[in-house]
Image: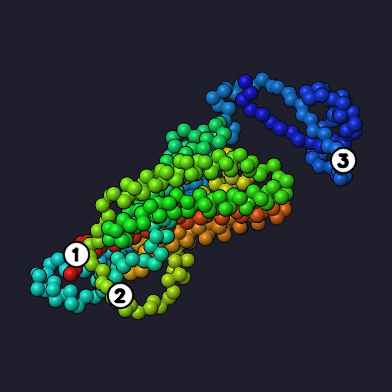
């Protein structure tokens, strides 16, 4: 049994004419002198090139269960622990800010309000101040509500894929010895979690519409087609580039047909089923009424998009060290096996995204909470460009660079949906809990 191998490449100038008369598996006519230091030679257009190999077996003392130890040897464990420690520091810093805001501002007001009698409460209602000023606008329906519901539903689906896949890999169900199980498992989990995407999107849609289930089928259908549509557009564009350059990496047409059949025959029906259950489930009732006429609120001193853009630096600081190992495993062929560290970092990322969305909370929280934590995708894409320039110097040609950037864009869109969903759901829970703690008429 083969438990390991070592490849020594070399290049030798030979006459290719005698080789044309050989049959497959025939022995090479002349003995070659292989110099491992010679790995390249000049060739002319139309010149035939001969490929051959020689195998030499050596008996060793490596046991069959230990054949992967050479590739899965734990290296850089201190770097992984440093990444986790760095993430914990960010979490502690943000948790302190959230705690100060909640205790000094909100909790104090709630305590004072609950200690008053009914007459004093009625008088206070007429003289609202602070966060209570926006009580009638906190749950006002956002712009493009259906798009927000779709993105949150798809984000739940992608986040579920990440959690289940990394958890299974951590427990050893997806070993590097089984090639392709990771991608196959992710595809299968994605289709199954279409039920969760449809359910969350439709139930959020009904919550924003105050229980109206009209249009739930359209929301479910769009949730089923949103992310796969982006993936199909990106993959088709990249496949045209690969086919035009006669690359062997082009996806066969039969595989495209199989993916489309899986999409429309399994993923879409499951998403519609989840949407049906979401339409039947009770919607989440708001704790306060929304005013018909919006309150005039002064403009902020600093633009909101600037704060949202800067908020992504904190989640990125949580994962950037682990991101290097992850990128190296994808683009440099290194075996990634530290799924335990990856699972811990993912949990820390979820906590940081939730805290960032709470720190930047204001009365226009719907979209802001989504993009505050989802803006980490911008920094991941910039890091991908940096990785291309400084770490993938051997990447040749504009087609290869375009392929890399296309797959990186596809990856950061998925990360934006997942992290944005974490921030939105955290803010929704916080705002609902905040205004349900005291009834304001």
- Quadrant in the picture for residue 146: bottom left
Q: Residue at x 55, y 26 (%)?
A: 66
| Residue underneath mark 1 | 438
Residue 212 or 139: which is nearer the viewer?
A: 212
Q: Secondary structure at mark 2?
A: loop
Q: CA distance from mark 1 to mark 3?
A: 83 Å
Image x and y of residue 145, in percent: 38, 62
Q: Residue at x 87, y 40 (%)?
A: 47
Instruction: Choose mark 2 or mark 1, whichever is in front.
Output: 2
- Mark 1 and mark 2 in contact (Cβ < 8 Å)? no
Q: Quadrant of the N terminus?
A: top right
Number of numbered tags placed on the structure image: 3
Q: Of the numbered discs in the image, which one, if any, rests on residue 294?
A: 2
| Residue underneath mark 3 | 47
Q: Secondary structure at mark 1?
A: loop
Residue 178 or 148: which is nearer the viewer?
A: 148
Q: Residues within 10 Å of mark 3 (few under 14, many from 20)?
A: few
- Of pointers 1 and 3, the one earlier in the residue sequence: 3
Image x and y of residue 383, in percent: 57, 57
Q: Of the numbered discs in the image, which one, if any, rests on residue 268?
A: none
Residue 25 or 218: which is nearer the viewer?
A: 218
Image x and y of residue 423, in percent: 39, 58
Instruction: Choose mark 1 or mark 3, whichever is in front.
Output: 3
Tell me if residue 318 can be seen: no
Question: Is residue 127 positioned above or below 384 on the image?
Answer: below
Q: CA distance from mark 3 to mark 2?
A: 76 Å
Image x and y of residue 25, in percent: 78, 23
- Of pointers 2 and 1, the one earlier in the residue sequence: 2
Q: Residue at x 24, y 64 (%)?
A: 435
Q: Residues within 10 Å of mark 1 (few under 14, many from 20)?
A: some
Q: Secondary structure at mark 3?
A: loop
Tell me if residue 376 can be seen: yes
């Amino acid at each position: 049994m083969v438990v390991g191998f070592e490849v020594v490449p070399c290049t030798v100038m030979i006459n290719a004419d005698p080789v044309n008369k050989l049959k497959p598996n025939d022995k090479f006519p002349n003995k070659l002198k292989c110099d491992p230091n010679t790995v390249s030679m000049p060739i002319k257009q139309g010149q035939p090139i001969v490929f051959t190999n020689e195998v030499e077996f050596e008996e060793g003392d490596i046991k069959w269960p230990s054949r992967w130890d050479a590739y899965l040897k734990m290296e850089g464990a201190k770097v992984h622990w440093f990444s986790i420690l760095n993430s914990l520091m960010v979490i502690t810093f943000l948790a302190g800010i959230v705690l100060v805001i909640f205790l000094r501002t909100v909790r104090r007001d709630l305590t004072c309000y609950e200690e008053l009698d009914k007459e004093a409460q009625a008088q206070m209602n007429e003289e609202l101040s602070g966060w209570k000023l926006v009580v009638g606008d906190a749950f006002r329906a956002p712009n493009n509500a259906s798009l927000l519901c779709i993105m949150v539903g798809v984000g739940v689906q992608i986040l579920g894929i990440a959690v289940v896949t990394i958890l299974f890999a951590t427990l050893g169900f997806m070993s590097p010895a089984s090639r392709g199980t990771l991608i196959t498992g992710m595809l299968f989990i994605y289709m199954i979690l279409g039920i969760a995407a449809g359910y969350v999107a439709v139930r959020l849609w009904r919550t924003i519409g105050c229980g109206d289930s009209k249009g739930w089928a359209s929301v479910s259908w769009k949730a089923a087609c949103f992310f796969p549509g982006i993936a199909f557009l990106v993959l088709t564009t990249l496949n045209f580039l690969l086919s035009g350059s006669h690359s062997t990496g082009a996806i066969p047409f039969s595989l495209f047909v199989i993916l489309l059949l899986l999409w429309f025959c399994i993923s879409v029906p499951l998403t519609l089923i989840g949407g049906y259950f979401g339409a039947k489930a009770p919607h989440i009732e708001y704790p306060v009424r929304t005013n018909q006429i919006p309150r005039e609120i002064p403009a902020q001193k600093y633009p909101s998009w600037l704060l949202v853009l800067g908020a992504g630096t904190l989640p990125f600081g949580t994962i950037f060290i682990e991101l290097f190992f992850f990128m190296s495993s994808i683009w440099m062929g290194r075996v990634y096996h530290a799924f335990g560290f990856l699972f811990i970092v993912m949990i820390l990322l979820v906590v940081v995204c939730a805290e960032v969305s709470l720190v930047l909370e204001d009365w226009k929280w719907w979209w802001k909470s989504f993009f505050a934590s989802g803006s980490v995708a911008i920094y991941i894409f910039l890091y991908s460009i940096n990785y291309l320039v400084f770490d993938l110097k051997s990447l040749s040609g504009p087609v290869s660079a375009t392929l890399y950037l296309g797959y990186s864009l596809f990856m950061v869109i998925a990360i934006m949906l997942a992290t944005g969903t974490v921030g939105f759901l955290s803010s929704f829970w916080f705002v609902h809990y905040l205004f349900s703690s005291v009834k304001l008429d």
